[in-house]
Image (spheres, grey):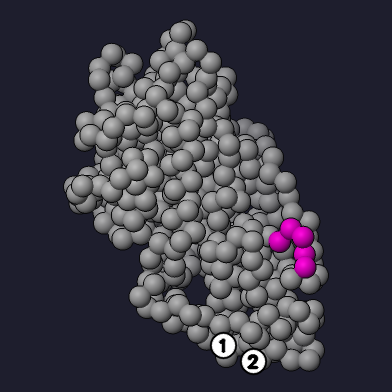
Amino acid sequence: MLVTGCLFTIALVFGTLVTFTTGLTDWQHISSFKQQTDYGRMCYRTVQNPYVYFGTKTTYGAVAGNDLQTPPDCRPLQVWMVSRHGTRYPSKKKIEELKKLNELKTMITAESTMCPEDIVAIKNWNTNLTKDDHYMLQRQGVEELKSLAVRLKRQFPQIFNNPYTENNFKFLTSHKQRAKDSATVFYQTIFNRNPENELPIVQTSDDRFYLYKCKQGEDDDDDTKGQGEVKKFEDGPLVRSVVSRVSMAMGLKQNLSYENVSLMLESCKYEKAWYIQSRPPWCAVFTQYDLEILEYIEDLKYYYANGYGNSIGESMGCPIVKDLIDNFKNLARGKNGPLGLFYFGHSPNVLSVVARLGIGKDNTPLLSTNFEQMKTRKWRTSFIDPFASNVIAVFYKCRDGNKAMIFLNEHSIPMGKDDCRSCPWEPIEAQFNAITSNNQTCNLDMCKNSAILSSINLVVVIFAYVIHELCI
């Protein structure tokens, strides 16, 4: 009876909802990363392997791969890339808020459970950030884009040994300064010269990269009000336990506010991204388990804003993925095309491509109530969308036919039914053609109805989860 009921319910759901699937095998590289040992309340100043996974503020080098390559008997014809800007400074509002930590550091008492070295480091902490640093590219962000350009030049000399012309290489960037600066640094490193003119900026009519009409413009420090599952998790017992442990670490008899604990985390993760080998003082108030819990907040946020928890999350990536597929299709048909296409933007730009390609998709939805169950989740923004995150696709002409490879942060992504990493182009084209070939649906017009869609979105996700639990 239960099985019959489940089958009927599933049929009803799928009869009502039309769902895209790319057919891509789920990205499973995350589970292969070495897990850090939980150091509990050990002295942070001396711990050997401090936790470095801070969601979208993770430093690129902590999670980047080394898979860029040209398969044997192949020649690259085109490199296509979408990249987030490099490591940046906070917003001017956040910079002002961080000054409050000077007051909070004086609250540490003799009852603190932190080691003396960590207490001294916090008491000596200060910030020299000013409002002029507002969202600007930090020097670590410059190095991230430089080193990425160097690796691409080294791996694909057949592409990058060619001189820059507007026909050979296409650039497009967000209008935000951090994205423009990232694109310029990349250009300078690739071509050993400055651009003669300002690199092209995306137009508001360009559905490939201008996502503001879907209220998905950029990564925003000031967008801190959690909604839906994010708010439930922030108000829930796990986050409350983090607040209690941080308060006890400082030797306080009463709990700090969650907002103050969040400020400590902001200082911790920004400084770790800026100075990779450093031990940021405010990281010491957290245990690794605390940081894992707080990392999940960011995963929930982007899962429901730009990922599979958003009813239009995958669809938002259709226009930019269509750009990729159309460019590769032209090459497969013997047409001439650019040697490289490079797009520089923000987290939503990268995540829209990730979701449309089917990367990092879990069988179980991320919820406020299943943190422990989702410890090995694929949707983990630390690995998917660190600073300078990127999706790179390469089209190859090979002795045995055309091939393509897709890389996420320089990790090769398995594609198709065979989980191939260097794949024949024809089945890849066929796989995506049904999604990208319909000009009437492969645009952002659906965002006009996004308010209606978002109101039913969470109900759909939770309903699917209940079905999964009952029937599997």
For image coordinates 50% across by 84% down, the residue present is 99
What distance separates the C-alpha of mark 1 from that of mark 2? 7 Å
Kind of residue sitting beneath label 2? Thr
Apparent side of residue 237 relative to residue 133 in the rendered image (left or right): right
Question: 88 left or right of 261?
Answer: left
Q: Residues within 10 Å of mark 1 (few under 14, many from 20)?
A: some
Callout 2: 10 Å neighbours few (<14), some, many (20+)? Answer: few
**Residue 107 magenta-highlighted:** no
Query: Residue 299, can we see it?
Result: no
- In this rendering, the count of numbered labels is 2
Residue 355 occupies quadrant: top left
Does the residue at mark 1 contact the one at mark 2 (Cβ under 8 Å)? yes
Name the one closer to the observer, 360 or 195.
195
Quarter placement of the N terminus: top right
- Does dot 1 land on a helix, a strand or a loop? helix
At a point 64% along the width and 58% down the height, the residue shown is 52
Name the residue nearer the viewer: 391 or 150. 150
Q: Position of residue 331 (x, y in %)?
A: 31, 19
Percent coordinates x, y for residue 4 in the rendering = 62, 32
As shown in the figure, which amino acid type bears the numbered disc 1? Asn
Residue 47 falls inside the magenta stretch: yes
The magenta segment is 46-50
Find residue 342 and report its horizontal and vertical position in percent.
34, 40
Q: Is residue 90 left or right of residue 445?
A: right
In the drawing, what numbered circle is on residue 102? 1
Label 2, on which residue?
106
